């Protein structure tokens, strides 16, 4: 009988954690905090645009401001992962880009055009995702239309393009280190998010229809 009671206590504890993670108050608090982080990142790039006159900094600042706005107003999730590793990876992947430093030199002339492509894709993906924006693996409304009809993670795909262009246009040792951290966490986030979402049969059906994660016919 003791093991049964112990399991009941564990189940009750997990249910309490799950309820806390899905609480509206906690999600609002997290939204405001991370929205402020992204807002500060946007502010730095808007200031850099005023100082250097590089239009890519202005575009980055505008898109990040929109992301912060959507994140603050995101909907309450139906399920949220309680796995500490998922939270660690998500926090690293979300905060690391804020350490990118805008500059005036890059190893690839014209790399700002790559940023433009990436941020345009990011804007389209963001509009497709809307208020279902998440940091840790969570199920809100499963999106299957718009950019999600082409790949399963268009937001991450756009991040890869935009951040690659960013590092090529703003090249420094610090930015290269941040880039490596972001790309590694991004791949882990994809795996962990799909493991969580695949618990829903509707998402498994979606995975069967849209086979590729980031790049059609490649990955």
Image (cartoon, grey):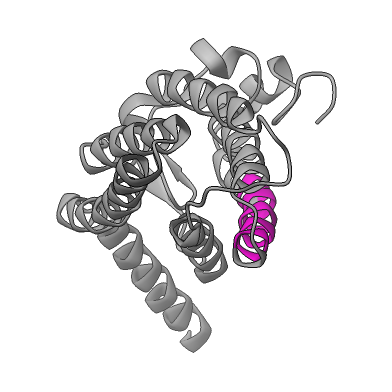
- Residue 145 makes an appearance in the image: no
Query: Image quarter for residue 163?
Result: top right
Q: Provide residue 32's location: percent of width, then percent of height.
A: 20, 53
Task: Say left or right for 160 vs 94.
Answer: right
Q: Provide residue 131's location: percent of width, then percent of height.
A: 30, 30
Task: Say left or right for 129 vs 192.
Answer: left
User: Which residue does the image show at 40% across and 43% down from the upper left?
Assistant: 52
Residue extending furthest toward the right: 218
Quadrant where the C terminus lies? top right
- Residue 198 makes an appearance in the image: yes
Q: Provide residue 172's location: percent of width, then percent of height.
A: 64, 61
Q: Nearer the viewer, residue 77 or 13?
A: 77
Q: Is residue 217 above or below residue 25?
A: above
Query: Image quarter for residue 154?
Result: top right
- Write the start and end of the magenta stretch as one range: 175-191
How many numbered discs sit on the rendered protein? 0
Q: Provide residue 158's location: percent of width, then percent of height.
A: 58, 31
Q: Is residue 73 in the magenta section?
A: no
User: Which residue does the image show at 53% across and 32% down from the upper left?
Assistant: 155
Task: Say left or right for 36 vs 178.
Answer: left
Main secondary structure along the magenta-highlighted residues: helix
Task: Say left or right for 12 vs 2.
Answer: left
Residue extending furthest toward the left: 25
Q: Is residue 97 above or below residue 11?
A: above
User: Which residue does the image show at 15% across and 55% down from the upper left?
Assistant: 25
Q: Nearer the viewer, residue 107 or 14?
A: 107
């Amino acid at each position: 009988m003791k093991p049964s009671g112990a399991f009941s206590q564990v189940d009750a504890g997990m249910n309490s954690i799950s309820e806390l993670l899905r609480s509206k108050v906690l999600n609002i608090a997290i939204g405001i905090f991370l929205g402020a982080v992204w807002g500060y990142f946007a502010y730095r790039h808007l200031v850099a645009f005023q100082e250097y006159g590089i239009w890519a900094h202005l575009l980055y600042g505008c898109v990040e401001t929109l992301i912060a706005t959507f994140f603050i107003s995101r909907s309450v999730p139906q399920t949220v992962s309680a796995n500490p590793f998922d939270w660690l990876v998500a926090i690293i992947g979300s905060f690391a880009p804020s350490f990118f430093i805008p500059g005036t030199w890059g190893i690839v002339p014209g790399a700002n055009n790559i940023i433009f492509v990436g941020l345009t894709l990011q804007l389209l993906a963001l509009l497709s995702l809307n208020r279902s924006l998440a940091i840790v693996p969570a199920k809100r409304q499963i999106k299957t239309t718009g950019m999600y009809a082409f790949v399963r993670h268009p937001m991450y795909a756009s991040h890869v393009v935009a951040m690659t262009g960013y590092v090529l246009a703003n090249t420094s040792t610090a930015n290269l280190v941040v880039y490596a951290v972001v790309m590694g966490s991004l791949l882990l986030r994809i795996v962990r998010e799909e493991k969580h979402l695949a618990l829903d049969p509707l998402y498994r059906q979606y995975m069967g229809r849209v086979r590729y994660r980031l790049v059609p016919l490649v990955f």
